[in-house]
Image (tube, grey):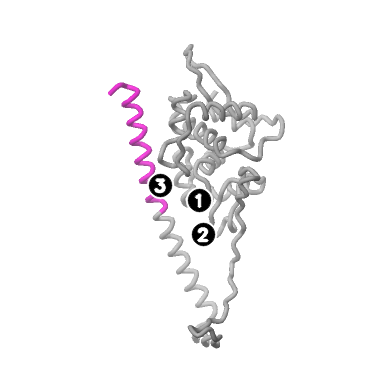
Amino acid sequence: MNEQDAAFEPESAPPRELSKSQRRVLGVLIEKGLTTPDQYPLTLKSLTTGCNQKSNRSPVTNYSEDAVEETVDELRQMGLAAVVHTGGGRTERFRHYARKRFPFSEVQLAVMAELWLRGRQQIGELRSRASRMCSIDSLDDLRSQLADLQSRGFVQADGPLERRGVSVDHAFYASSEAVRMASEPDEVEAKPGIGETGVNRPASAPPEVGSDELADVQASIDELRTAQRELASEMQSAIERIREIAEEVSDLRTQLGA
């Protein structure tokens, strides 16, 4: 049964906290299941390699196979992973059951995997990276999926999802990690300047420009800055994807003995 067929089957309440290693292993199982289905389920060696790959991971790790296997056992106890044997092979392989434990659509599954693998990122970055696993037609479509996830407490954001440049993250951090995203204020109160001598100086008189015109200019500047950041993020994502493809080609050559 592939990932699209694994429908949500509520049992006990799904976990709301995952350790760093649990997030990494689960994210890799989801990612590889969607991007390289011919090689899925994963052997322990492939799963460990996926956890430690240098592209599309933050932070980069160096887990041993024993550590990864221990983490898989933890996920199995949560009902999030399983050991399978395919094609009569003796080698154990591992798969996830996230779709059985969480009410995620396929897009949401890809989004959560990306956030578990990399953490906080802007919506434009998230769409670019998650689209490797599942097609996301537009930023509006992604915002709709994120709004649903946010309403159920699976993701968090530092501002309204409609705002350009807003960052999102998963909400599965362990309580000991204390990682929470507080919404940023829309406006910051201006304070009078202080001269080099430390004496308060009166604020300069504002230019004779209408408030609406000033607001439009500031909005245009903000949009240009955000577009520049998103373009830089997309370029970085493309570079990371090229590196990932190079690693996959190298792995294939190794497996084929080339």
The residue to which callout 3 is attached is 237
Residue 214: numbered disc? none
Residue at (49, 72) in percent of width and height? 218
Residue at (59, 62) in percent of width and height? 184
Residue 164: numbered disc? 2
> Residue lying farthest front?
197
**Contact flag, marks 1 and 3 (Cβ < 8 Å):** no
Magenta: main secondary structure: helix
First in sequence: mark 2 or mark 1? 1
Query: Badge 3, how many Cα within 10 Å: few under 14, some, many 20+?
Result: some
Q: Please state which of residues 223 and 101 is positioned toward the viewer in this rendering.
A: 101
Residue 74 sits inside the magenta stretch = no
- Tell me the amino acid under the disc marked 2: Arg
Q: Which is in the foreground here, disc 3 or disc 2?
A: 3
Q: Please state which of residues 213 and 160 is positioned toward the viewer in this rendering.
A: 160
Question: Where 77 sits versus 118, above or below?
Answer: above
Q: Which residues are magenta?
A: 233-258
Rendered image quadrant of residue 176: top right
First in sequence: mark 1 or mark 3? 1
Q: CA distance from mark 1 to mark 3?
A: 12 Å
Identify the secondary structure beneath mark 1: strand
Query: Badge 1, how many Cα within 10 Å: few under 14, some, many 20+?
Result: some
Residue at (59, 53) in percent of width and height? 157
Instruction: Tell me the quarter of the image containing the N terminus.
Output: top right
- Tell me the amino acid under the disc marked 3: Ser
**Contact flag, marks 2 and 1 (Cβ < 8 Å):** no
Percent coordinates x, y for residue 158 in the rendering: 58, 57
Question: Where 64 sits versus 126, above or below?
Answer: above
Instruction: Tell me the quarter of the image containing the C terminus.
Output: top left
The residue to which callout 1 is attached is 121
